[in-house]
Image: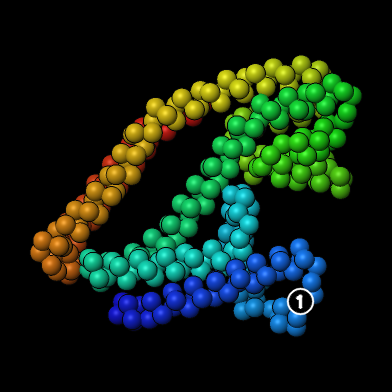
Amino acid sequence: MILAVMLFGPVVVMLLAMLAFREFVGAARDRHVAISGAESGSDDDATSALQLFDRWFRRTRPGRWLERELEFAGIERAPSVMFFGGLSLGLVMVVLIANLLAPLLAVAGLGLGFLGVRVYLKRAQERRREAFVSQLPELARVLANASYAGLSLPTAIAIAGDELAEPARTELSRVATRLRFGAPLTTALDELRQRVGSRETSVLISTLVVASRSGGSLVTALRDIAGTLEQRKETRREVKTTLAQPVATSYFVIVLGVLMLLMLNTMQPGTVDKMTRSVVGQAALLISFSIFGLGFWAIRKMTRIDI
């Protein structure tokens, strides 16, 4: 099986790359047609194979999960494109591990492809969340000014969505659209809380919900929250700067383990392959991987601070 992956893996990767390139070219042509107003030919109306696969993939459980993660990350990509990207990465890792280390370890390459997509999505979600949190003080001030002018809360949210930059523009526009179509305020704001998922957002949403129910002084509360959120943003920036070196060290631990295996296999070719074919070698590799993984987990655990 490993031999078959090594032989046909590059061919599959090339085909997937050509398919993805064709899809991106088609998307660029569609945007050009939409901007210029020109009519597309009969070939543009044909549904590509990737679009057919994407329609089927969205109905599966992995497709729904990937679509939701892409929405939370703010990435405008089809789930099938990310799926093929992870599969291509996994096949590349299979070929590299089989040639550089050992064929029996190449199976982990497919897992690395899935892990790469997951890490990419989590990092994109984290960047989007941090960007939204940094806009919360300005958002609170805009809502306070709109409420002071006598506007209702749904109207104030719509105005904030028009004035603020991304990603607040998209998120608030979704909330305003849901409110425009009759959704309750609590439901629309809870959906925003689920997409963003930060403590600062929860505090702001709770304030808006309580003020809308009790009829309290929303302007005063929003102005107080704006100052508090500004202080929390500075604190978060200082903490991230302080913990930058330990976080980099945690990733260097994993890189160091991989480099040690490569160095061992370079000095004595075939050593890792022989280790994977004996019980003692497999136990040594398992213990080594566990130690490096435990070190990574311990450093990340010690540097994780909720503020």
**Front-most of residues 178 and 48:** 48
Query: Residue 7 sits in which quadrant?
Result: bottom left
Q: Is 60 situated above or below 177?
A: below
All told, the count of numbered labels is: 1
Near-viewer residue (292 or 228) = 228
Q: At 54% across and 63% down in the image, what residue appears?
A: 82
**With respect to residue 99, does 164 lie above or below?**
above
Q: Is residue 35 above or below residue 224?
A: below
Residue at x 59% of width, y 63% of height: 79
Quadrant housing residue 77: bottom right
Classify mark 1: helix, strand or loop.
loop
Give neighbour class at mark 1: few <14, some 14-19, many 20+ (Cα, 10 Å). Answer: few
**Measured from the top left, where is residue 48 in percent x and y?**
65, 78
- Looking at the image, residue 294 sits to the left or right of residue 148; the answer is left
Work out whether residue 138 or residue 236 is closer to the camera in this orientation and state it: 138
**Is residue 107 among what the camera can see?**
no
Query: Going by the picture, which residue comes out furthest to the left?
Result: 268
Taking the spot 76% from the left edge, 28% from the top edge, the residue there is 142
Instruction: Relative to 35, say whether 52 is above or below.
Output: below
**Occupied quadrant, residue 1:** bottom left
Residue 295 locus on image (x, y percent): 28, 41
Residue 202 image position (x, y, % from top left): 65, 32
Disc 1 target residue:
40
Q: Please indicate, yes or no, whether residue 11 appears anywhere in the rendered image.
A: yes
Side of 288 relative to 183 (left or right): left
Q: Residue at x 69, y 28 (%)?
A: 138
Instruction: Give how far across and how far down residue 52 sits, in percent.
Output: 65, 76
Horizontal relation, residue 85 to residue 145: left or right: left
Please name the amino acid that badge 1 sits on.
Ser
